[in-house]
């Protein structure tokens, strides 16, 4: 392309007086040309130019740009600009080949060390060191840390002054708070120790401030920050109550709204993804494919290709499907079960609408699905990690329960972003408000109920409780075969007019305030959830009001809703488990509970 000869020699001037990163640096015209000639872009997106300027100035950089925000260019372009090779550390094997092909198409040589065979690595390393055309070296953190040949390669590049900088893609994997934490990522803290003069560029799409701090501390860098808020104007967020037959509900949703459109359905379990795929295909004639981590690399690549080429429109996947997907026209992302955190929801649903066309992000939600999430908790070993994950679960549950606040605002708060934006009815709650300008919202103070529960639990110290017992307590239902039946306060308490769903919400708030605490015990095939007093059992005394917000139904809707619910009750068998050993409510559906109250 001609630009290569002009490549900026290794004599970047000391920037003594720092000017804003979006101002014109002396390489302004050169990076504009490269962007056009090498990468075929007409302009820079978002904050790409700022990041590129900082990288060229050899700064450590932390860039958090939204999914599809064009993060790759922020290391690819500066690399073309420099003499040496750039080491890109990324957790994804499945999509690196794709990246390399793209770079090839732009006339750039890249290598991916994806083998553990000694001789093969040796040959690759030799080539990288001797062939100056090789500009990109892709590595997984595991290989970088574990393989001595690769460590030597990097050392050799540095000695020859051919090591440009390190890129840590998907840098949120470093954070132990994050859901994608990878042990080997933590060990990247050795980079600055071994190579104090080599800059590090961290790239990620979604992190909270706390996670950023942890990543930066861990890497021992003091970077320039480029943080874009999480607001995505073209995404519509919606929580849809999961119905009794969620599969048919899902099929109906897809057929009515997304005929022949590209989409992703997230589910939390590999086997269930396969089953759901089969049901959608065989019963509802919706063509789709599944994707999860047990597939071979070949299978993954094939499925990805079919999906990206549009041969198959819908992919049913676990969270293994995600980072680095390059498909711009995803019209919908449906979470068929509750995601593990609001951060995960944001990131996974953010794969929709990269082309800036309106796209939907949906959770099919019922509160009792939360037990699906406890399965993941048992796989977390540290107590701290468990507690953090629990808190994340409470946050996403509150998000789903919220029928009042703007979802985009809630997401923005979650990331502690101070970005200003207008939702423009691009979430279900704002849309409801726009359509029903007279809709009212009311708050009910449940502090007394919370107090009652706490008092009971303090009195019966050391006793652990099941959800069912606590819910029964609220409902004033006497327990069977339980010494509690002798307890005078137990039977006498009945909170008027409370539905089971309300009680769940009160308990959720109390859990989040650490007035209560949950723990999980695996018994055979079941995760049993128990509740005990939390760290702050008296917190409500310091006037934490446990109040819930309700959306007041519009006059006309009242009857309609009631009819619907009553119909549900009739059709529904009672699902409260009678099995004392599992002693838990397996499913709580509004209809069922109304049924009980009616009895
Ligand atoms: P991210 O890693 O941030 O999710 P990518 O780097 O994969 O995003 O880029 C997403 C898409 O945007 C790619 O198809 C890429 O070619 C395209 N892209 C990147 N920068 C630009 C630009 N300046 N102009 C137009 N398209 C761009
Ligand atoms: Mg990327
Ligand atoms: Zn909104």
Image (tube, helix red, strand yellow):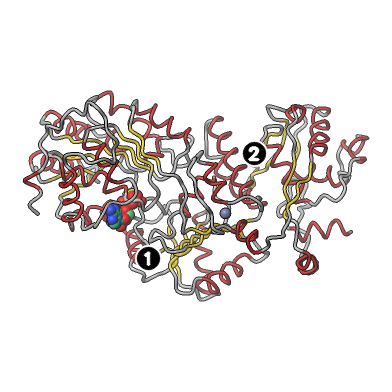
Vertical relation: 153 (above or below) 169 = above
Q: CA distance from mark 2 to mark 1?
A: 38 Å
Asked whether residue 420 is in view, the answer is: yes
User: Would you identify the image quadrant in which residue 11 lies?
Assistant: top left
| In this picture, residue 429 sits left or right of residue 412 | right
Q: Nearer the viewer, residue 566 or 572?
A: 566
Dot label at residue 307: 1
Residue at 56%, 35% in the rendered image: 388
| In this picture, residue 520 sits left or right of residue 540 | left
What is the x, y in percent for residue 368? 67, 52
| In this picture, residue 544 sits left or right of residue 408 | right
Residues packed near mark 1 inside 10 Å, few (<14), some (14 to 19) or many (20 plus): many
User: Would you identify the image quadrant in which residue 587 lies?
Assistant: bottom right
Dot label at residue 520: 2
Q: Quadrant holding ligand 1?
A: bottom left
Quadrant in which the N terminus is drawn: bottom left
Residue at 60%, 44% in the rendered image: 374
User: Would you identify the image quadrant in which residue 149 lies?
Assistant: top left
Look at the numbered disc 1 and say if its residue's Cβ is closer than 8 Å to ligand 1: no
| In this picture, residue 146 sits left or right of residue 289 | left
Vertical relation: 475 (above or below) 454 = below
Vertical relation: 97 (above or below) 289 = above
């Amino acid at each position: 392309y001609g630009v290569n000869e002009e490549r900026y020699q290794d004599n970047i001037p000391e920037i003594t007086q720092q000017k804003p990163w979006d101002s014109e640096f002396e390489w302004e015209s050169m990076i504009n040309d490269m962007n056009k000639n090498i990468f075929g872009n007409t302009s820079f997106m978002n904050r790409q130019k700022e990041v590129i300027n900082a990288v060229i100035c050899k700064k450590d950089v932390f860039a958090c740009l939204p999914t599809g925000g064009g993060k790759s260019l922020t290391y690819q372009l500066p690399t073309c600009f420099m003499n040496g090779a750039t080491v890109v550390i990324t957790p994804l094997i499945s999509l690196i080949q794709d990246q390399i092909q793209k770079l090839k198409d732009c006339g750039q040589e890249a290598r991916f060390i994806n083998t553990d065979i000694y001789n093969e690595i040796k040959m690759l390393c030799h080539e990288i060191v001797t062939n100056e055309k090789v500009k990109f070296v892709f590595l997984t953190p595991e290989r970088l840390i574990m393989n001595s040949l690769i460590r030597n390669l990097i050392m050799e590049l540095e000695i020859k002054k051919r090591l440009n900088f390190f890129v840590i893609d998907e840098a949120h994997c470093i954070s132990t708070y994050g859901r994608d934490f990878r042990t080997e990522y933590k060990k990247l803290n050795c980079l600055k120790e071994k190579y104090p003069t080599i800059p590090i560029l961290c790239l990620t799409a979604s992190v909270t401030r706390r996670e950023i701090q942890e990543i930066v501390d861990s890497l021992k860098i003091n970077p320039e920050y480029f943080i874009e808020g999480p607001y995505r104007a073209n995404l519509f967020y919606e929580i849809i109550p999961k119905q009794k037959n969620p599969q048919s509900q899902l099929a109906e949703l897809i057929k009515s709204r997304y005929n022949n459109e590209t989409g992703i359905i997230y589910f939390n379990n590999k086997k269930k993804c396969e089953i759901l795929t089969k049901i959608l295909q065989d019963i509802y004639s919706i063509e789709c494919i599944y994707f999860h981590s047990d597939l071979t690399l070949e299978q993954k690549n094939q499925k990805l290709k079919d999906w990206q080429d549009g041969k198959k429109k819908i992919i049913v996947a676990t969270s293994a499907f995600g980072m680095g997907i390059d498909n711009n026209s995803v019209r919908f992302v449906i979470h068929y079960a509750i995601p593990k955190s609001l951060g995960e929801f944001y990131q996974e649903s953010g794969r929709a609408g990269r082309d800036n066309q309106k796209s939907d992000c949906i959770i099919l939600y019922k509160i009792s699905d939360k037990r699906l999430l406890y399965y993941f908790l048992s796989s977390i070993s540290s107590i701290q990690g468990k507690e953090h994950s629990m808190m994340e679960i409470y946050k996403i549950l509150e998000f789903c329960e919220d029928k009042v606040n703007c979802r985009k605002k809630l997401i923005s708060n979650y990331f502690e972003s101070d970005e200003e934006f207008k939702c423009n009815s691009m979430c279900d709650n704002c849309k409801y408000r726009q359509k029903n300008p007279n809709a009212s919202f009311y708050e009910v103070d449940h502090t007394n109920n919370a107090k009652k529960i706490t008092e009971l639990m303090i009195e019966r110290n050391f006793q652990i409780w099941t959800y069912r017992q606590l819910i029964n307590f609220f409902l004033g239902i006497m327990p069977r075969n339980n010494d509690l039946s002798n307890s005078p306060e137990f039977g006498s308490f009945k909170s008027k007019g409370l539905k089971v769903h309300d009680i769940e919400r009160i308990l959720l708030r109390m859990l989040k305030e650490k007035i209560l605490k949950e723990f999980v015990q695996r018994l055979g095939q079941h995760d049993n959830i128990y509740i005990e007093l939390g760290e702050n059992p008296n917190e409500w005394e310091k006037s934490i009001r446990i109040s819930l917000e309700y959306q007041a139904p519009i006059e006309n809707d009242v009857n309609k809703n009631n009819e619907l619910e009553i119909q549900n009750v009739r059709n529904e068998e009672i699902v409260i488990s009678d099995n004392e050993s599992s002693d838990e409510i397996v499913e709580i559906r509004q209809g069922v509970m109304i049924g009980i109250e009616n009895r």
